[in-house]
Image (cartoon, rainbow, N blue to C red):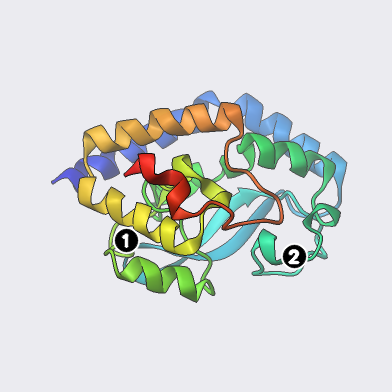
Amino acid sequence: MYLIFKRIIGFILSLMALIILSPLILILIIAIKMDSPGPILFKQKRVGIHKSHFNILKFRTMYIDTPKDTPTHLLGNPDQYITKVGKFLRKTSLDELPQLINILKGDMAIIGPRPALWNQYDLIEERDKYGANDVPVGLSGWAQINGRDELEIPLKAKLDGEYVKKQGLIMDIRCIIGTIISVFKSDGVVEGGTGSLAAKEVKEID
């Protein structure tokens, strides 16, 4: 029942957010087009619930000659691929705004494990251990507010598993509040790096 409630609330909130934020979205669209040639939106194949695939939407933050389907931390020098506007979008997480459309479509929820790239087999396999591939993926989640890019993959999957166990209205509200705080502080955003935060450094999360 909660998943049905979550879907309805996600649809309503994402629709409201798109309407309210439409002036900001228009400004960002103009800024992206003026900054560099290429499409406004970036589409990438990601893993959704039950390991189904869908195209996640983001505002484009990189030049069009950037290698495709490669996580940022695997690029030799990611800064050379990120546009000027893109740096601002990534730091503020505004590049994620188009995922409100994914939520409207039912590809994602507001809160859940962040959708892995289709070829992040190590993360997908780790999530299988905790049942984290069998819940709706989200715009933000428990792992996102507890380390984000800094988390090692086993720890990220473990945190996703904790979310699965505690999934409910209270847990989702905690994640939403934590997301707002993390965005304002730019916590866990590490361009070109991941996995620097080991389990012993986040014991207080458990």
Identify the residue shown where x is 63% and y is 43%: 189
Comparing 148 with 169, the one in front is: 148
Q: Is residue 168 left or right of residue 103?
A: left
Identify the residue shown where x is 51% and y is 59%: 152
Against 103, residue 193 (above or below) is below
Given the image, on which type of amino acid does mark 2 rest?
Leu
- How far across and down, in percent of the image, does residue 160 sit? 35, 54
Question: How far is disc 1 from disc 2 in space, using C-alphas?
Answer: 27 Å
Comparing 198 with 39, the one in front is: 198
> Picture quarter containing residue 142?
top left
Element marked by disc 1: loop
Element marked by disc 2: loop
Comparing 9 with 93, the one in front is: 93
Identify the residue shown where x is 74% and y is 65%: 75
- How far across and down, in percent of the image, does residue 180 sit? 48, 28
The answer to which of marks 1 and 2 sits earlier in the sequence is: 2
- So how many labels did they put on this image? 2
For the C terminus, the quadrant is top left
Q: Residue 132: which numbered mark, if any?
A: 1
Residue 101 seen by the camera:
yes
Against 68, residue 158 (above or below) is above
Return the residue at label 2.
75
Q: Is residue 42 left or right of residue 200?
A: right
